[in-house]
Image (tube, rainbow, N blue to C red):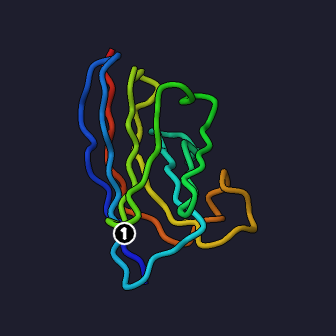
Amino acid sequence: QVQLVESGGGLVQAGGSLRLSCVASARTFSPSGMGWFRQGPGKEREFVAYITWSGGDTWYADSVKGRFTISRDNAKNTMYLQMNSLKPDDTAVYYCAVRPATGLGYWLANAYSNWGQGTQVTVSS
């Protein structure tokens, strides 16, 4: 049983930065990887970034590539999302999630078995 808690959201001006954290609480934790998704008002949930748990390989949505960096600390069961050069279009609730194994693509929400409650990120113009 895995519990996920996101933190680090807030209100920033365009061009600013935020660092999100996601802590996984579990007796044992060795998933294929973890990812970040986001959902803005009236929009569908969309993929943001993914990282493999063992090797730390990363993948990003085109909309955030070059601005966001995903990372993880295996010893702390924690994943991070460093967000730089934020834009108003980045405004959304950000969710972390666990992908337990390969199968469905990492960019698909249905590939993930556990989700956090989300943290709000608001970027003003």
- Locate residue 87, reporting x and y percent: 42, 21
In the picture provided, is 40 more to the left or to the right than 125? right
Q: In what quadrant of the picture does the C terminus appear?
A: top left
In the picture provided, is 51 more to the left or to the right than 7? right
* Residue displayed at 49% across by 61% down: 97
How many numbered marks, from 0 up?
A: 1
- Identify residue for label 1: 24
Q: Quadrant for residue 47, please give it.
A: top right
Amino acid of disc 1: Ala
* Residue displayed at 58% across by 28% down: 63
Of helix, strand and loop, which one carries label 1? Answer: strand
Q: In what quadrant of the picture does the N terminus appear?
A: bottom left
* Residue displayed at 60% across by 39% down: 60
- Locate residue 62, reporting x and y percent: 63, 30
**With respect to residue 88, does 23 lie above or below?**
below
In the picture provided, is 44 more to the left or to the right than 89? right
* Residue displayed at 44% across by 48% down: 71
**With respect to residue 79, does 47 lie above or below?**
above
- Locate residue 35, reporting x and y percent: 52, 54
Q: Nearer the viewer, residue 104 or 57?
A: 57
Outermost residue toward the right in this view: 103
Say few, some or many: other residues with alpha carbon within 10 Å of mark 1 (under 14 / 14 to 19 / 20 or more): many
- Locate residue 67, reporting x and y percent: 47, 26
**With respect to residue 50, does 69 lie above or below?**
above
